[in-house]
Amino acid sequence: MCSASSDLTAQAKIRNAAIAHFARDGFGKTGLRAVAATAGVSPGLVIHHFGSKERLRSVCDDHVLRILVQRADNAGPSGMQDLFREYLSNPEEYRLQVQYMLRAIEEDTPAAGTFVDTLVAESEQVLRAGIADGSMRPSSDVRALAVLTVLNSVATLTMPPPLARALGHERFGPDVLRRLALPTLELYTHGLFTDDTALKAARAALDESPQKRD
């Protein structure tokens, strides 16, 4: 996202530099001087275009949110396949955008709420359509399953280096994603357990919980 191409406007260069800093360092630790240095402009020009760090953050939120929501809206029934294909088309840019939004989620910003609500709604729609046409198994809680699939996808795309190294790579990238693709789909297609012992035990424990009895 932090392209240095000369056809970018000064505002776009500043915005892209800010997105990279906010994603990596967080909003509170990022200073306008650092953003300006990365963008190759003066701190005064950052203030001229955006007025304040809060306004710059708002512009970055809107930009990343618009891109990620558009991708979610364009996703078809293949869901994760579409997500991974989009990632593989430009791994660094897509991962940075997801990391940025993950930071926003941690800070519970309005943009993050819109992003999560959109992804969960799209995921739930795909799941309900699959259950209706018989291509997916019914769930005891489709909404919760939608949240779980979104959580899994976001966590995968923002995998920390120690987990990537467990698969023999220094950091997450296309090779790690390819390594995970088949096991992920095997898990979704065939499940993990060979019987329902664990499921029955969980149901029994939930039925006996104080919240359930109340």
Image (cartoon, rainbow, N blue to C red):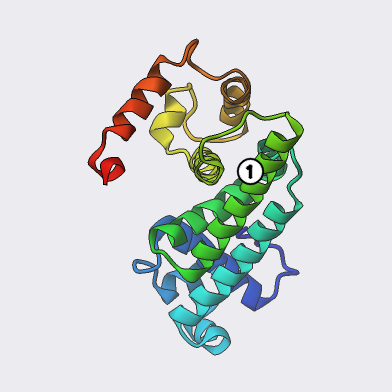
- Residue 169 located left or right of residue 121: left
The residue shown at (59%, 23%) is: 179
- Residue 32 located left or right of residue 111: left
Determine whether 81 is above or below 53 in the image. Answer: above
Quadrant of residue 40 in the image? bottom right
Residue 144 or residue 95, whichever sits in front? 144
The residue shown at (65%, 72%) is: 12
The residue shown at (50%, 10%) is: 194
Quadrant of residue 115 in the image? bottom right
Q: Amino acid at mark 1?
A: Pro
Quadrant of residue 183 in the image? top right
Determine whether 180 is above or below 93 in the image. Answer: above
| Residue indicated by mark 1 | 91
Question: Does residue 51 appear in this view?
Answer: yes
Where does the image place residue 98, in percent across and percent down from the top left? Answer: 55, 52
Where does the image place residue 208, in percent across and percent down from the top left? Answer: 27, 33
Where does the image place residue 11, in percent across and percent down from the top left? Answer: 63, 77
- Residue 135 located left or right of residue 187: right
- Residue 141 located left or right of residue 211: right
Count of labels in the image:
1
Determine whether 174 is above or below 193 in the image. Answer: below
